[in-house]
Amino acid sequence: MTDTAQQAEGRGRTLEKGTSPAGNGTSGRRAPLGDPATRGRTTIADGVVEKIAGLAARDVEGVHALGSGVSRGFGAVRDRVPGGRSVTRGVRAEVGEVQAALDLDIVVDYGVSIVAVAHGVRENVIAAVERMTGLEVIEVNIAVGDVKLPEDTDDDDQEQRVQ
């Protein structure tokens, strides 16, 4: 590289001394580079989308819990450890550059319309994920794995024997 050229770091292009990136020969003044959204890339981890979806699903009336019986059992133990509560239990996401697909395992309260709860979960999850991430949610698959009966007790509902 000569004295009159400098490498634009990280961009792989060469700028002549005294020129702007637009190449109009003006020094000291920057030419507008266009839309800031085109000047880099944002990536969103699967776990971020899973957290958003998990919280949005729990906000729907009639959803008792998320996760299958096995994952809820392990989760009950994990929840007792400080900082161990998982909002992503029962949620799996596949995130691409512009789209996301989600799978949710839910437990519904007895007496509610499962179809209405699934519809509400789907709407709430899609709205939250699209609003917060800008990703297009192409599908939200919901598996209802259990119904919470009024007389069923959860580990969370039981009193501790020893305090």
Image (cartoon, rainbow, N blue to C red):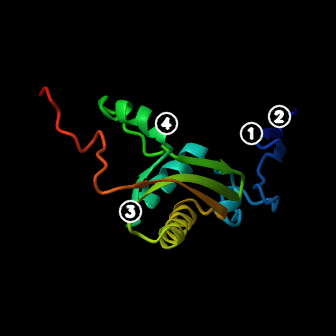
- The amino acid type of the residue labelled 2 equals Asp
Callout 3: 10 Å neighbours few (<14), some, many (20+)?
some
Q: Is mark 1 on a helix, strand or loop?
A: loop
- Residue in the image at 82% along x and 58% along y: 23
Furthest residue toward right: 1
Q: Could you tell me if the residues under marks 2 and 1 are in contact, i.e. CB atoms within 8 Å?
A: no
Q: Which of 68 and 86 is in front in this view?
A: 68
Q: Quadrant of the C terminus?
A: top left
Specify few, some or many for label 4: CA neighbours under 10 Å numbering under 14, 14-19, or 20 or more: few
The spot of residue 65 in percent (x, y) is 41, 51
Q: What residue type is labelled 1?
A: Gly
**Sequence-first disc among 3 and 4:** 4
- Mark 1 vs 4, N-terminal side: 1
Q: Distance between the residues labelled 1 and 4?
A: 47 Å
Which residue is the extreme one toward the left?
A: 163
Earlier-in-chain disc, 4 versus 2: 2
Q: Is residue 154 visible?
A: yes
Mark 3, residue position: 110
- Depth check: give the residue in front, 52 or 39: 52
Q: Earlier in the sequence, mark 1 or mark 3?
A: 1
Q: Is residue 54 left or right of residue 81?
A: right
Q: Which mark is residue 10?
A: 1
**Upstream in sequence: badge 2 or badge 1:** 2
Q: What residue would you read off at disc 2?
A: 3
Q: From the viewer's perspective, is the residue at label 3 or at label 4 nearer?
A: 3
Q: Is mark 2 on a helix, strand or loop?
A: loop
Residue 27 in picture, x, y percent from top left: 71, 56
Number of marks present in the image shown: 4
**Lower position in the chain sequence, tag 2 or tag 3:** 2
Disc 3 marks a residue whose amino acid type is Tyr
